[in-house]
Image (cartoon, rainbow, N blue to C red):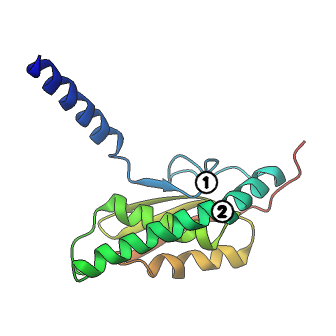
Amino acid sequence: MKKIAMVLLGSILLAGTVACESNVSKTSASAPNSTEQTGDTPTTETAKNNQNDAASEVRRNQLNSDIRAREQRNNMTGGDADRADSDVASEVSSKLEANIPKSQLTVKAKQGAVVVSGTVQSQEQLNKIEPLTKEIKGVQSVNVAAKVAPAVPAQ
């Protein structure tokens, strides 16, 4: 019975590890699934839902808690430790979601190089992406492949 339990546990852990291998983080459920895509122009309803989600008190608390926990972890290690690509991508995604709530962005990180793609509502929001991303420890370069796509009314 112990052998079966160990095999089952090992299988679950392996499946979890494989599922977590993707270094892509998204600011909304409607964001593209990879940084190779720029995403579709969002509808007014999608943009409103993204903004409401990012502006909700619960989500705002989650984002702030996530960012604080990472900052504390970085401070404990002196901030000079190598950071996992998924950690950098997730932190950048949280930062962008908190500061650009109507966005549909996908973030991918690899060895300090961050790629951000998707759509934002205005040129002002597009201009915010690079400076916000560079605020995150571990980010060495930023490639902004996002485009401006104002929301269109749903048909």
Q: Residue furthest front?
A: 1
Q: Which of the pair 120/96 is nearer the observer?
A: 96
Q: Quick check: 114 left or right of 34?
A: left
Tell me which residue sits at (76%, 51%) in the image: 46
Tell me which residue sits at (79%, 62%) in the image: 150
Residue 155 to residue 51: above or below: above
Tell me which residue sits at (35%, 62%) in the image: 87
Which label was assigned to residue 83?
none
Give me the C-alpha separation between circle 1 and circle 2. 9 Å
Quadrant where the image shows the N terminus: top left
Looking at the picture, how far across and down is residue 72, in whole percent?
Answer: 33, 77
Tell me which residue sits at (50%, 49%) in the image: 34
Q: Which of the pair 52/151 is nearer the observer?
A: 52
What residue would you read off at disc 2?
54
Looking at the picture, how far across and down is residue 64, in whole percent?
Answer: 52, 71
The first of marks 1 and 2 along the sequence is 1
Q: Secondary structure at mark 2?
A: helix
Q: Quick check: 116 left or right of 79?
A: right
The count of marks equals 2
Looking at the picture, how far across and down is residue 21, in whole percent?
Answer: 32, 46
Residue 85 to residue 136: above or below: above
Q: Secondary structure at mark 1?
A: loop
**What amino acid type is highlighted by mark number 2?**
Ala
User: Do the residues bearing badges 1 and 2 touch, measured as CB atoms within 8 Å?
Assistant: yes
Quadrant where the image shows the C terminus: top right
Looking at the picture, how far across and down is residue 28, in whole percent?
Answer: 61, 54
Are there few (<14), some (14-19), or many (20+) residues within 10 Å of tag 1? many
Which label was assigned to residue 28?
1
**What amino acid type is highlighted by mark number 1?**
Ser
Residue 129 to residue 10: above or below: below
Residue 142 at least partly seen: yes
Residue 139 at least partly seen: no
